[in-house]
Amino acid sequence: MNVANVEMLPSPITNERSGEVELTYTCEKSEKETLELAMRPFRRYFRKMFAIAALMFVVMFGFELSELMVEGLANQSDLSHIFLFMAMAIASAGWLLHRRFRRGVIDTYRKRKTNLAEYRLSDEGFYCAYGESKATMPWSEFAKYRIDPDALYLQCHSGNVACIPDWNGRGVDGAELAAVLEKAGLTRMGASKARRFASGALWVMLAFLIFSAAWNIHRSWETLRWHIVGIELKRQLHELVNGDGSKGGNPYSYSRYWKERGNSAQQLAVLCCKFDFGKRYYIFDENDDEEKVGLAATEGDKLWCVYLPCGSFCQYDIAKFEEFKECGYFRGFYPESERDKWLEKARPLARELREDMDDDE
């Protein structure tokens, strides 16, 4: 967006005797005041750009976090890098435009030989002068206007904006000023229907991306927690079958498994993950070579099962589990009250099972 650093003109006054619009006055503004007034109409555009960039960073962080959570566990995408590039591009563009516009206003201000400005507004247009520098612009040069209590903004058809300070308190109110400008063919500044539609579509897209990032985090957490529960049950099964003091330690302990294999996000998730296991079942099926020994635990309406020597890990709905159990699908399930009976059968296989668990590691 191009911006013309033209001082703003005052509001018009109607000469009661002639019926013509006529306002002439002088004022002087400091560099700080001039900069504040000149940048005001465009701040919302810069803020919108930085807000969009910030939201893109949030989306990028969400996708990056979801990828870190399932690193090494599931397929990953490079979406986070795309959003990072977009966020940096938008933020950089906003910063460069803001800097360029600000620099242009300051340079124009400092080039003037005097900052005492004379303004004149009439039915035909407005006139402004800084010492020997003078400019006259007819109303046909302008398309829109904006009236603030301390400044009048006139937007050219090209997009440049003329800024006229201190119009207020000179014999005309805002409604009268607006009537004069609209009679000259100007309309109020504001986004067109196409721009409003585009802006709405953009915010809808950003909302969708944020929702998508949140959904990806949720799915990644479900995938990671599935893995965390599986490793926790394998740790408990290893401890039960081999004892606390088994040679080499437990390969599924936090220090051995997650510190060696997990990244920082996964390690933090493991530390924050809470287990609320209810009933436990101890599995020994003499007729099944793949799922011979196992451990099952209920959690809410789920049943988690881990088996050896195959090392498989499954989840079932409690209702389905009870239904399948009645049909004889699950065999060799020992309740907690019969854990010692299960251990008598499982521990003789400890050496073989441990070798399989080490291989699975």
Image (cartoon, helix red, strand yellow):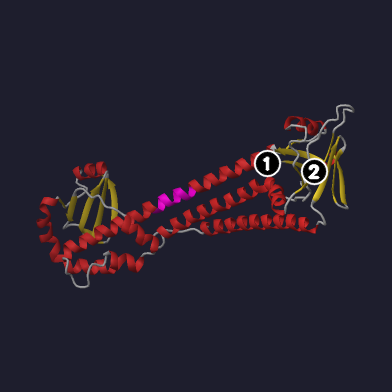
Q: Position of residue 278 (x, y in %)?
A: 21, 48
Say whether residue 221 is left or right of residue 230: right
Instruction: Answer above or below: position of 171 versus 36.
Output: above
**Residue shown at 25%/49% (left/top)?**
276
Q: Evaluate whether residue 312 shows in this view.
A: no
Disc 1 target residue: 195
Say whether residue 226 is left or right of residue 248: right
Secondary-structure class at tag 1: helix
- Classify 10 Å Cα crowding around label 1: few (below 14), some (14-19), many (20 and above): few
- Classify 10 Å Cα crowding around label 2: few (below 14), some (14-19), many (20 and above): few
Quick one: which residue is furthest to the right in this view?
Answer: 18
Q: Where is residue 49 in the image (x, y as percent from the top left)?
A: 62, 50
Quarter placement of the C terminus: bottom left
Q: Where is residue 344 in the image (x, y as percent from the top left)?
A: 10, 61
Q: Tell me which amino acid carries mark 1.
A: Arg
**Nearest the eye: 272 or 26:** 26
Q: Evaluate whether residue 246 shows in this view.
A: yes
* Residue 217 magenta-highlighted: yes
Give the magenta-colored segment's residue range: 212-220
Q: Quadrant of residue 149?
A: top right
Disc 2 target residue: 157
Instruction: Answer above or below: position of 189 versus 340.
Output: above
Q: Tell me which amino acid carries mark 2.
A: His
* Residue 330 magenta-highlighted: no
Say whether residue 116 is left or right of residue 149: right
**Nearest the eye: 186 or 288:** 186
